[in-house]
Image (tube, helix red, strand yellow):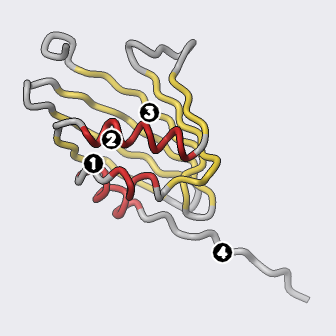
Amino acid sequence: MPIAQHAAAAFDLAGLTRALERSDAASIVSFYDDDAEMEIIDRNRPPSAPMRLVGRPAIEAFWRDICAREMTHAVGEAISDTGRAAFVERCAYPDGCHVVSAMTLELHDGRIRRHLTVQAWDETSCG
């Protein structure tokens, strides 16, 4: 008797890209598992003490804050398969500050289970 195969759900990277570029926090959060984890590393949150967010409510609060800021978002260098996705997000504030974030996602059944962001921003123009 054949063993039943569970087909992994596809991840909608194009949909996540649209949500990020439109600053649509609710749509962004809909891509995460309920128990997802997010880790952010940057100048203020080094590898020894990164920001860690656990669970959709904490991740939602983060994205609502980011999406409420006046800035543009552009996603590029994107790639995904059934288990992983990665992309670069380039953001610009009206004051000229630029931020670049490299993100990797661990996926499960088409949803984000783990999210790692490493980011850098202009030191001279960002306050």
Q: Is residue 40 above or below residue 44?
A: below
**Helix, strand or loop at mark 1:** strand
Q: Amino acid at mark 2?
A: Val
Among numbered discs 1 and 4, the one appearing first in the sequence = 4
Callouts 2 and 1 close, C-beta under 8 Å: yes
Q: Mark 4 is on which residue type?
A: Ala
What is the CA distance from the residue labelled 2 to the residue labelled 1?
5 Å
Closer to the eye: label 4 or 3: 3
Q: Nearer the viewer, mark 1 or mark 3?
A: 3
Query: Which residue matches tag 4?
Result: 7
**In the image, what residue occupies the spot 53% across and 37% down?**
38
Quadrant assignment for the N terminus? bottom right
Q: Secondary structure at mark 2?
A: strand
Q: Earlier in the sequence, mark 3 or mark 2?
A: 2
Q: Which residue is mark 1?
A: 76
The first of marks 1 and 3 along the sequence is 1
Callout 3 secondary element: strand
Q: What is the spatial separation of the Cα atoms under label 1 and label 4, in whole angstroms?
A: 28 Å
Query: Residue placed at 17% from the left, 42% from the top?
Result: 72
Which badge, 2 or 1, is on the more N-terminal residue? Answer: 1
Vertical comparison of 79 with 109: above or below: above
Amino acid, disc 3: Thr
Q: Which residue is mark 3?
A: 117
Q: Nearer the viewer, mark 3 or mark 2?
A: 3
Q: Is residue 49 left or right of residue 127?
A: right
Snapshot quadrant of residue 37: top right
Question: Residue drawn at (40%, 19%), measured in percent from left and top?
Answer: 42
Of the two numbered discs 4 and 3 on the same chain, state the one appearing first in sequence: 4
